[in-house]
Amino acid sequence: MPDITYAVIDPATGEVAATYPTATDAGIEDALTAAHGALARTGTVAGRAVLLRKVADLHRERRADLAATIVREMGKPLAEAEGEIDFCVDIYAYYADHAAAFLADEPIDIGAGQGSAVLRRSPFGTLLGIMPWNFPAYQVARFAAPNLAAGNTLLLKHAPQCPASAAALEQIFLDAGFTKGAYVNIYATHEQVARMIADPRLRGVSLTGSERAGAAVAELAGRHLKKIVLELGGSDPFIVLSTDDLDATVDHAVAARLDNTGQACNAAKRFIIVETLYEDFVAKFTERLLARSPATPLSSQDAADLLARQVDAAVAQGATLISTGRRHGAYFPAGVLTGVTSQHDVAHQELFGPVAMLFRAADEHHAVQIANDTPYGLGSYVFTTDPQQAGRVADRIEAGMVFVNGVLAESAELPFGGIKRSGFGRELGRPGIEEFVNKKLIRILAH
């Protein structure tokens, strides 16, 4: 029996709407053969840019269907699902516009009379993308757009609960005109993934998911000397040091916690408030967060069960939970945990859902200490009216990204990724296309 079942399961009811057949071993071999063989037919950078623009156009044209599929598969609010597709359009268009410049030869100055040297960026090879359920289209765009632009070919293993999105996205690449084998969707098992990573035709792996999945893939990739990029979640701090508009800051905080019903790797999860603002912030934040308690379910009952266990453990260890409403299936009410310290297990965990942890900081230095007291290092948020303080704190935060005085400010131009147990490597922006290219030195000596 396969170790994975690909199925569309309604998060609100738990009912199975559709199942998809898991790949056979022969199907995986065919996919690898097709992707490896397509490397010689990916064309020019200019030609690939034209195809990526068609991919962007098709996302725009099929926005309603793609968004509705996301809602059915993992319960995302419809407006957010539509926004996710819009972001995908931006990403594919961005790499269509910039691929030629990003991949252009880079001359190296070696001095007069010494000949010439150039750094040439060429395709890395066939790559495996292992994608999560929380952003079924956007996560694929982050991986697919830069790597197809670079001339790599892709095998895409989506999350088991997103098979319909996986099929719809593969069809878009085919309809856009990419050669057969350039992008291949595979409903693979864990065992099949392991065999693919071991196969010499596969050159690299990009995974977004849990620490456990990242560690397993990193072990396999290391054993077979394959390059990897990992994005493994986080427990992002939201630091408030000063403000001239507390209400606006609180609104930012609520938005940062409830994005995707709290199921975003880079959502704010730990709110660290300086002593002088703490009481007022907690009162306003708690009121507004609870008032916006999600009307949509988490991605699954399993996800809600995990969050409940984490929250219950925090309370058992002495934290205080303020919440309204009752847990029902995959529906999870918003909540605020106060009294959390570094001694609580939850302080070092990722809460994937609409529950926030609040911490009181004595001053700037203490706030940074709390922010860095985590195994994660993905994103972070700093609110202050002092530009010099913003710079100091941004420098000291151990994270791959720092956003000052704003939230939900990601864009196709900005590199995305983290450090520590949040993974390594970058997606989006120019760094996103640099991960899987062969930076070949060509040195020509003077006669």
Image (cartoon, grey):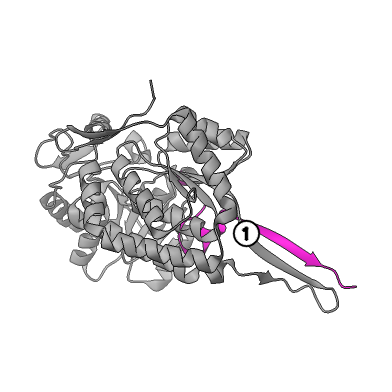
As drawn, is 345 to the left or to the right of 111? Answer: left
Q: Position of residue 368 (x, y in %)?
A: 41, 54
Q: Position of residue 408 (x, y in %)?
A: 30, 61
- Residue identified by numbered label 1: 122
Task: Determine the residue positioned at 24% across, 61% down.
Answer: 252
- Residue furthest to the top: 1
Above or below, 426 relative to 321: below
Above or below, 47 relative to 187: below
Quarter of the image with the C terminus is: bottom right
Q: Is residue 432 magenta?
A: yes
Callout 1: SS? strand
Closest to the observer: 196 or 217?
A: 196
Task: Determine the residue positioned at 27% across, 62% down.
Answer: 61
Above or below, 377 relative to 414: above
Residue type indicated by callout 1 = Ser
Task: Count neighbours of disc 1 (C-alpha within 10 A) and say few if under 14, some if 14 to 19, many if 20 or more.
Answer: some
Task: Please say whether residue 234 is visible from this viewpoint.
Answer: yes
Q: Position of residue 110 (x, y in %)?
A: 78, 72
Query: Which region shows up in magenta?
Result: 422-447
Closest to the observer: 327 or 369?
A: 327
Task: Determine the residue positioned at 69% across, 59% down.
Answer: 440
As drawn, is 429 to the left or to the right of 409? Answer: right
